[in-house]
Image: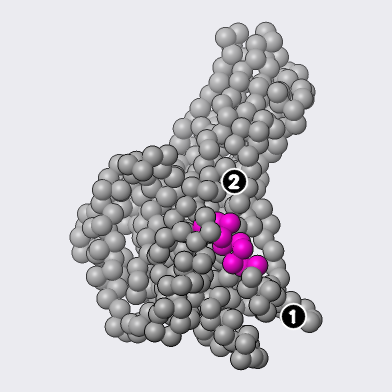
Amino acid sequence: MSTLVKWNPDAIVQGQSTIEHKRIVCECGELIADNFHDGQILSLNIKCHQCGKMHSFRDPLPGDVFPHSSVKIPDQEMGIGRPINMSGGTIFGEQAIDAIGQIWPSSQRTGLSIDNAGMDEVEEVFNAMSNNAMASHLRFVRASPTGSGDDFRYPVASAISLLRKKIASGPVILDDLEVSHALFTIKSVYGIFDQWRMHPRFGMLTEGLKGANNFWHTWATCELAKSFWAGGSQVTFGIAERPEQAVLDLYGRDRDGAKTYFEIKTVKSLLWPSSTSINNIDFDGIVRKLVKNSKDQLLKKNAVICVASPTFSREIPERIRDAAKSYFNRKRGSGNCAGIMCLGVEAMLINYSPPKKFSFGFPVLSEWAPNPYSNRPDPIAKKNTFLPLVPATAK
């Protein structure tokens, strides 16, 4: 068992939480750990310097993702002679990995072969995530009027069908908008699979992919979780253990230890491809319905609604932000909704490596409208924000 042995009374684990202020004091009066929040010290023993008593800390929860600033203590006794100062990170014993498996996202592959072999690989990866649903998704897409990339219900199958047509007719024009979005969709498949497949809740996280209309919900959940991790904060996937159990999609802790819950939503007119032009989208109506339809889920948690818009439009997240601000100011209520966020995507950045390998990325952007009448302070517009996607000060 990973164990820290205090060599003197000053050798404590010191956090910086301004919310929970947890403190562990030994029976003999010696301070063991101070000012930390629940989940910041895990799968670890700390041995008292004065009386030798062992203090044990719990294992992580199955949905936890540790921040990148975390410290792993090996499976042995280690002496400490001075305080261990933590900010928003987690200190954990090696047994934490034994308890739940991988607890942070893995690296993602950077290349893609834009040929039929590359499309075969994407199909295999999606099958691994969706309980072999690719064949049925492709049948639905091929039965659509165009037989390729215009079915928002099955975006992965649509992307593969479109790219196979482009490959057959050749050449594939990368700056074609349809092609670019198809490549973004495939990049998102690899992002979900490569980064999260070793997480203990990966099967539950991707279970919805076998059905329609769920891919972008899963994408947004994974993007938020990755952002928490990159921002140095702890995040937990809030996946229901039972079908009848209603839970929010995830929550994160900022460096003060405060929890913020997120409920992910998708809206048809904000997905690719949309038959509605931006000027004809009812953004006020979308925000109104988002809050109304989420009331039961937000009732106890005072959560943020996060709507996914994986298009190449900067304007859509900005319009959602403005509509949300207007809604909150009109209503002067909806106290259980801490705010509304919109996740969008920038256009493709490409690096080319001959003969057919491409490295490309799609920077994720977001806009955020806090609810000034919420029951809690703005959880994001703080100096120690745990969401680097979001500006420190909302526009």
Can the viewer see residue 27 in this picture?
Answer: yes
Q: Amino acid at mark 1?
A: Lys
Could you tell me the amino acid type at mark 2? His
Q: Nearer the viewer, residue 366 or 18?
A: 366
* Span highlighted in magenta in the image: 121-130
Residue marked by disc 2? 199
Distance (Cα) linking label 1 and label 2 = 32 Å
Horizontal side of 127 relative to 315 (left or right) equals right
Quarter that holds the C terminus: bottom left
Label of residue 356 in the image: 1
The dot on residue 64 is none
Q: Secondary structure at mark 1?
A: loop
Rendered location of residue 206, percent (x, y) = 50, 54
Residue 232 left/right relative to 277? right
Q: Are marks 1 and 2 in contact (CB under 8 Å)?
A: no
Q: Residue at x 46, y 68 (%)?
A: 137
Q: Secondary structure at mark 2?
A: loop
Is residue 316 shown left or right of residue 205?
Answer: left
Q: Is residue 94 above or below residue 197?
A: above
Residue 45 falls within the magenta-colored stretch: no
- Of the image marks 1 and 2, the number of the one nearer the N terminus: 2
Please report the residue visible at 31 percent of the width from the left and 52 percent of the height from the top. 337
| Quarter placement of the N terminus | top right
Q: Is residue 50 visible?
A: no
Classify mark 2: residues with Cα within 10 Å, few (<14), some (14-19) or many (20+).
many
Q: Position of residue 101 (x, y in %)?
A: 63, 39
Work out which residue is located at the far left of the displayed protein and give it: 331
Residue 371 in the image: above or below residue 70 = below
342 or 310: nearer the viewer: 310
User: Is residue 124 found inside the magenta-colored segment of the image?
Assistant: yes
Q: Quadrant of residue 326?
A: bottom left
* Neighbours of disc 1 within 10 Å: few (<14), some (14-19), many (20+): few
